[in-house]
Image: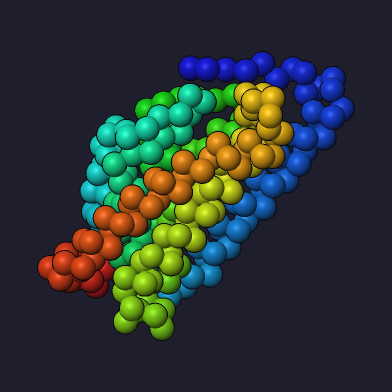
Amino acid sequence: MNTLLLSKFSYDPIVSLSEVWLYILMAVLILIIGALAFFFGKREKVNHTKAVVYAGVMIALSFALSYVRLFHLPQGGSVTLASLLPLLLYSYAFGARRGVLVGLICGLLQFIQEPIIYHPAQFLLDYPIAFSAIGLSGILFRTPTANKKILRFVLGAVFAGLIRYASHVISGIFVFYVWAPEAYGAVAWGFLYNTFVFADIAIAIALGVVLLGVKPIDKALIKACN
């Protein structure tokens, strides 16, 4: 496991101030995810037993697909063969509240798979928070746009991807800035390095749209949450 000694935070006032902002932004992100999951979760009425069973299946599928990497970055992060798709489909079928919980579990499994930790906040931002954000793809669960299922799936997935991106960017700006090339500042490098998130979510969305276009699969998802 990679580690980084953080004793310098106690002596460098600039770094200490940065750490304060790191925790503030992390707390804001947690509040956003929690509030959205709670608010949109009010309308989620599904079969609890089915939700638990499907959660186990989708977590296993996501974890297995995460080993099929199309591209791996040197300081962590990778583009996989649609490892996010099972999480997106689960949230699509069972809603944001359950989706966030399943995403959090997947985030912890990702850490077990590749345990990279340089800072406690970085661990939270890059694993449980980033992946729980994927569960927000279910915020349009049974909304007035329900008759436009593919649109609902795509919009929810794009929104979830943006929140995940924000989580990685915050981690990148305040922790991974030490690896930024000389031509880039901490902020610019944080935004640029984590663009892999868009490729990862785009692959999952594209395959999801194809699958949802197959009527038997779409009907199976509808049946699952009833």
218 left or right, relative to 111:
left
Identify which residue is drawn at 26% across, 55% down: 207
Q: Residue furthest right?
A: 13
Q: Is residue 201 left or right of residue 179?
A: left
Expressed as whole percent of the image width and height from the top left, the position of residue 224 reads 21, 66
Q: Nearer the viewer, residue 55 or 131?
A: 131
Q: Locate residue 223 relative to residue 39 in the image: left or right.
A: left
Quarter of the image for residue 115 reads top left
Q: Residue at x 12, y 68 (%)?
A: 216
The vertical placement of 101 against 22, above or below, is below
Quarter that holds the C terminus:
bottom left
Identified at 77% across, 18% down, the residue is 8
- Relative vertical location of residue 82 with respect to residue 174 in this rendering, above or below: below
**Percent x, y of residue 197:** 46, 45
Considering only vertical position in the picture, is 29 above or below 18?
A: below
Closer to the camera in the image, 37 or 13 = 13
Q: Is residue 138 visible?
A: no
Given residues 186 and 51, the one toward you in this image is 186
Q: Count all numbered tags in the image, as a single digit.
A: 0
**Quadrant position of residue 108:** top left
Q: Is residue 68 visible?
A: yes
Q: x, y percentage for residue 99?
A: 40, 57
Please state if 217 lies on the left or on the right of 33 as rendered: left
Name the residue located 84 percent from the left edge and 22 percent from the top edge: 12
Render colour scheme:
rainbow
On the image, the x and y values in percent for residue 15 come to 79, 28
